[in-house]
Amino acid sequence: MTRIFLSPPHVGTRERELLLDAFDSNWIAPLGPHVDAFEDDLAARVGVAHAAALSSGTAGLHLALRLLGVAAGAEVWCSTLTFAATANAIIYVGASPVFVDADPATWQLDPALLAEALVDRRRTGRLPAAVVVVDLYGQCADYDAILPVCAEHGVPVIEDAAEALGATYRGRQAGSFGQMAVLSFNGNKILTTSGGGALLSDRGDLVERARFLATQARDPAPHYEHSEVGFNYRLSNLLAAVGRGQLAGLDDKVAARRRVNARYREGLGDLAGIEFMPEAGYGTPNWWLTCLTVDAEAFGASVTDIRLALDAADIEARPLWKPMHLQPVFGGCTALGGGVANQLFAHGLCLPSGSNLAPADQDRVIGIVRACHQR
Ligand SMILES: *Cc1c(COP(=O)(O)O)cnc(C)c1O
């Protein structure tokens, strides 16, 4: 039996054909026709006017903060329950992250807590330069509650949709919220280019400037002329070709991950002490990862017992993201609440959720979790 991974890449013949096309056309140079086409396809799919293909989602977050002019010493607020890249990008621009707790009803950034804190900060005169809102595990945050409040205080929003491509919120696609949104095509995400990302926005000036900064900020001149510090953040033509193939299969991949989620709920939902990540009801999650929490007393085994039992069977499962306010590297940073995220981290688990997870393999996972309960 082979190891069952949490979220392995899932590529097909279309990706292979497009990659070979890029190779054979000798567009090995970083930019090329597949980059342009991938950007057009992405913007069309998400329903935004413009997209810039980048080397990673992290690069996209960094550029988004730069484009907003976030300066050293400013505060940027973000979800505490997220992957470190969200917070790292805030450090890259010299700003200080402030971590906002999760809403237990959705596991997403808590809109009520955010609204309260913004009112409070307005009184004391120190509003954040931006808020980075994460769409966690493939479910959108509650934008109808978040965006008007941020707009009222003049605080721009960046959507970190790295985990959420293909999810919807009230009929709109993830990646279309805030001033700018960021996607990731890392190897474990819903689509992969092995590594890659994108910055999306309806504002053409921002996306144009993202491309400029991402290509070493080269001024128009026959020689190499630079009046700003740039970055080497563009996606290569070879990887964009893979991305185009992946994007054509997005609907199938979302459907497959949602089937995996439904099957876990069916196979484990009857067990006392197990609660799945709640579905908010305001949209369709892509269920990038299927996550649950375990009440050890009711279930009869702890979340660690389950993870170790799966590991012993060569099955990869992981705790939820460790909240940023608990990370040693962000030890000195402010947190707004944090108790909800702490509880989720203490009791949560991500199960293998790949769009290519075979039903027989998923049955093995379900069987092992059930066996922990019966012990
Ligand atoms: C994966 C991820 C990122 C970073 O994307 P990369 O392409 O790996 O740089 C950022 N934010 C979140 C929430 C992620 O899950």
Image (spheres, rainbow, N blue to C red):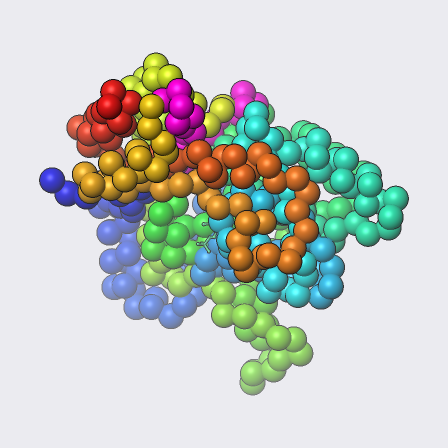
Indicate whether 141 appears above or below 271. below
Q: Is residue 114 left or right of residue 29?
A: right
Indicate whether 171 appears above or below 119. above
Depth order, front residue of 273/136: 273
Most extreme residue toward the left, as rendered?
1
Q: Does the segment drawn in magenta span residue 101?
A: no
- Residue 369 x, y percent position in the rendering: 27, 27
Based on the displayed image, in which of its 4 quarters is residue 355 positioned?
Answer: top left
Asked whether residue 37 is in view, the answer is no
Based on the displayed image, in which of its 4 quarters is residue 74 positioned?
Answer: bottom right
The mark total stands at 0
- Quarter of the image with the N terminus is top left
- Residue 77 x, y percent position in the rendering: 67, 48
- Residue 125 x, y percent position in the rendering: 86, 50
Most extreme residue toward the bottom, as rendered?
223
Depth order, front residue of 141/177: 141
Q: Residue at x 61, y 82 (%)?
A: 225
Which residues, given as a range, are shown in magenta? 280-299
Q: Residue at x 49, y 24 (%)?
A: 278
Q: Residue at x 71, y 60 (%)?
A: 70
- Residue 332 x, y percent position in the rendering: 64, 58
- Quarter of the image with the C terminus is top left
